Amino acid sequence: MVNIIVCGINGRMGKAIEELCLHDDSVEIVAGIDIIDDSTLGFPVFGNYDEVDVKADVIIDFSHISVLDSLLDFAIKNNVAVRCLCRFSATFVYKTNGIIYFKQLYEDEKWKTTSR
């Protein structure tokens, strides 16, 4: 079972991932990250990465570039793979210090990190 944190869980794409995961027994969303707390979901939704107290295998990111530094800090600290799917992250990450993190993660084989 792959345990997933979805950043941007209450957005359109986050909801689409949630729906897909409901029909796939090999994955489970263990937490969401969003500025909007939705207590009707079957998992906790945290306002930021400092609050996260669950273990995950991967973070699927549909958030804003402003969350990128805390996302990467959390991923490195907790050895969690990252899949950034946010257009803003992929477009502007190269203009932030975040590129150093992505490069380090990508070059280290223990990380399965991509950004597109």
Image: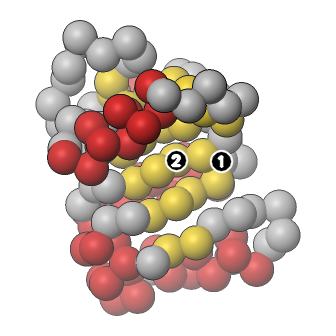
| Residue that lies at the very extreme toward the front in this rendered image | 23
Amino acid at dot 1: Val
Secondary element at image label 2 = strand
Residues marked 1 and 2 touching at CB (< 8 Å): yes
Percent x, y of residue 71: 45, 53
Is 102 above or below relative to 57? below
Residues packed near mark 1 inside 10 Å, few (<14), some (14 to 19) or many (20 plus): many
Nearest the viewer among 81 and 74 is 81
Secondary element at image label 1 = loop
Q: In which quarter of the image is residue 107?
A: bottom right
Amino acid at dot 2: Ile
Residue at left 83%, top 61%? Answer: 110
Residue that mark 2 sits on: 59
Q: In which quarter of the image is residue 46?
A: top left
Residue at left 19%, top 44%? Answer: 11
Residue that mark 1 sits on: 80
Residue at left 55%, top 37%? Answer: 4
* Quadrant housing the C terminus: bottom left
Q: Which of marks 1 and 2 is nearer the N terminus?
A: 2
Does residue 28 appear in this view?
A: yes
* Quadrant housing the N terminus: top right
Does residue 77 appear in this view?
A: no
